[in-house]
Image (tube, rainbow, N blue to C red):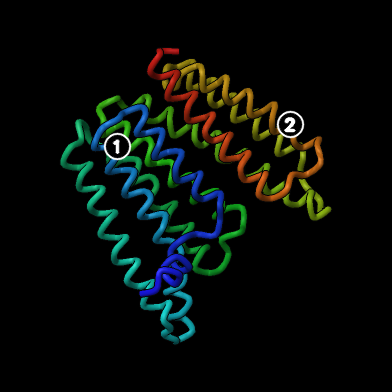
Amino acid sequence: MAKSTLRTVVVPTEHGGWGFTLEPALLGMIVAPGLPALGVAIATFAIFLSRRPLRIAVADWRRDRRLARTDVALWSIVGLGIIAIAGLALTWTMASDPFWWPLVVAAPLVAAQLSFDLDNRGRELVPELLGPIALGAAAPMAILAGGVGWRIAVGAWLVLLARIVPSILLVRAQLRRAKEQDFALTSTIATSTAALVVVAGAAAVGWAPWMSAGAAALLVLWNSNSMRLPPLPVKTLGWTQMLAGAIVVVAFAAGYHVGW
């Protein structure tokens, strides 16, 4: 099996997916460090990496063809499935508390996103939202497994949700601006503001640290200002969004550990 073929079949081409996968895995591991969180992170990345080979295998099956890449895709799915199961088994063995409910909530979101993806509709808004939201379940799963408690687990997922939705809408709007197409400035800014309200509400009831609200406020300012500047190049836009995700993760984790 050639390394170049394996890389082409398995490694996703969308840069944003890496950030949306890393953020919840990293958040869970920092808030509740230990083997349970490591197991969740392993399973999450295996599931994320299985998306592209699954799409390739299904596309080849629908066209009734079997290429070299088809076998690579099928074996990759099997291998990544084994890794995901091993990660979840590690978490199951070492978990302090039950951690399954975020996975139960995320499962139908994953199924819906895959349905869009396999029909070559993965670039539409709904599947672009469903995938990252489902991946966000990694954070509450790790936090629950680490014995931190359901309130912080729910708060972590809410904070990630409040980061994901405005980010995706902002990127889509910026891409449309770069192509000189119509874009929705009001809804983009309104969504960022609503996200700040959600995070502040979670902090007010003790489900998230107040530092998360500070990070959310910073992102509102950034999103509002960026829509008034010339559109950024695609790569620069991607890196700025990964930086935004890192700020959210660090703010929540640091705020949790210092108590504010």
The quarter of the image holding the N terminus is bottom left
In the image, taking residue 222 as reference, residue 7 lies left or right, namely left
Residue occupying image coordinates x 44% and y 51%: 109
Judge whether 118 appears above or below 107 on screen.
below
Residue 149 horizontal/vertical position (percent) = 30, 25
- Measure the C-alpha gap from mark 2 to mark 1: 35 Å
Q: Position of residue 182 (x, y in %)?
A: 81, 51
Mark 2, mark 1: which one is toward the viewer? 1
Image location of residue 164, percent across then percent down: 55, 40
Mark 2 or mark 1: whose residue is earlier in sequence: 1
Q: Residue at x 54, y 55 (%)?
A: 127
Furthest residue toward left = 93
Residue type (three-letter) at the residue carrying disc 2: Ser
Q: Residues within 10 Å of mark 1 (few under 14, many from 20)?
A: many
Residue 138 location, quadrant: top left
| Helix, strand or loop at mark 2 | helix
Q: Amino acid at mark 1?
A: Ala
Please state if 6 lies on the left or on the right of 195 as rendered.
left
Pick the residue in front: 1 or 134: 1
Q: Is residue 199 left or right of residue 255?
A: right
Q: Residue furthest right?
A: 180
> Which residue lies most toward the front here?
3
Vertical comparison of 70 with 109: above or below: below
In this view, the residue in front, 75 or 165, is 75
Mark 2: few/some/many CA within 10 Å (<14, 14-19, 20+): some
* Secondary structure of the residue carrying numbered label 1: helix
The percent coordinates of residue 143 (x first, y second) are 32, 31
Residue pictured at 44% horizontal, 20% vertical: 254
What residue is shown with label 2?
224
| Disc 1 target residue | 37
